[in-house]
Amino acid sequence: MAMINENELRQEALLNVAKRMVLAARTAPKARGVNTLSMSILTGSDIQALAKTMKQIGEKEDNPIFLRDAANVLNAAQAVVLMGTRIQSLGLKTCGLCGFPDCEAKDKEPDFPCAFNTGDLGIAIGSAASIAMDGRIDNRIMYTLGVAAQQMGLLGKQVKIIYGFPLSATSKNPFFDRKK
């Protein structure tokens, strides 16, 4: 039997967990069974491009959180899982959870999120986070990754709300205890 070095298996194991995260999010419950989610896994130069966009946003908006997260992701993320949702009402006659009396009224404001879209995304994110935890993969849910991914159109122009999970397999989670 050949010896397998930890460094050889770490990336493969991390990507396997990332794939399981996407599957867990896909199979998470959806309102009325309507799927509005889109997901992808980034590695290598795609992570670098995302971090560059985060840095550009931070500089343009004078927002140190984007700068901090960009550096953190660039230096530590071995993969990034992106999860987002399109905005699509469910055609309900009675609801009002979004602030409009019904879906017909909400549809007149197509960029205003449906409460079910964001709720489904939150449930999917929770399912994915539980898989990362079960796999003992360092992670953190970041809106800054999502803002940059949305700006870059990484999940498509129709996906309006995105969050990202940077993933790492190291001795200490690099996505916590960060400098402000």
Image (tube, helix red, strand yellow):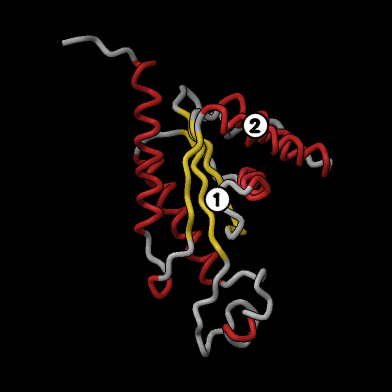
Q: Where does label 2 land, which residue?
A: 178
- Residue 64 on image: x %, y %: 77, 38
The number of numbered discs placed on residues in the rendered structure image is 2
**Residue at 40% in and 48% down:** 22
**Distance of label 2 from label 1 (alpha carbons):** 28 Å
Q: Which amino acid does label 2 sit on?
A: Arg
Q: How crowded is mark 2: few (under 14 residues within 10 Å), some or many (20 or more)?
A: few
- The image shows residue 78, relative to residue 143, as above or below, that is above
Describe the element under mark 2 as helix, strand or loop.
loop
Query: Of all residues shown, which one is farthest toward the top?
Result: 2
Query: Of all residues shown, which one is farthest toward the bottom?
Result: 93
**Residue at 72% in and 39% down:** 66
Describe the element under mark 1 as helix, strand or loop.
loop
- Determine contact: label 2, label 1, CB under 8 Å: no
Q: Residues within 10 Å of mark 1 (few under 14, many from 20)?
A: many
- Residue 128 on image: x %, y %: 42, 49
Q: Which of 42 and 174 is in front in this view?
A: 42
Q: Where does label 1 land, which residue?
A: 155
**Residue at 53% in and 60% down:** 85
Q: In which quarter of the image is the C terminus?
A: top right
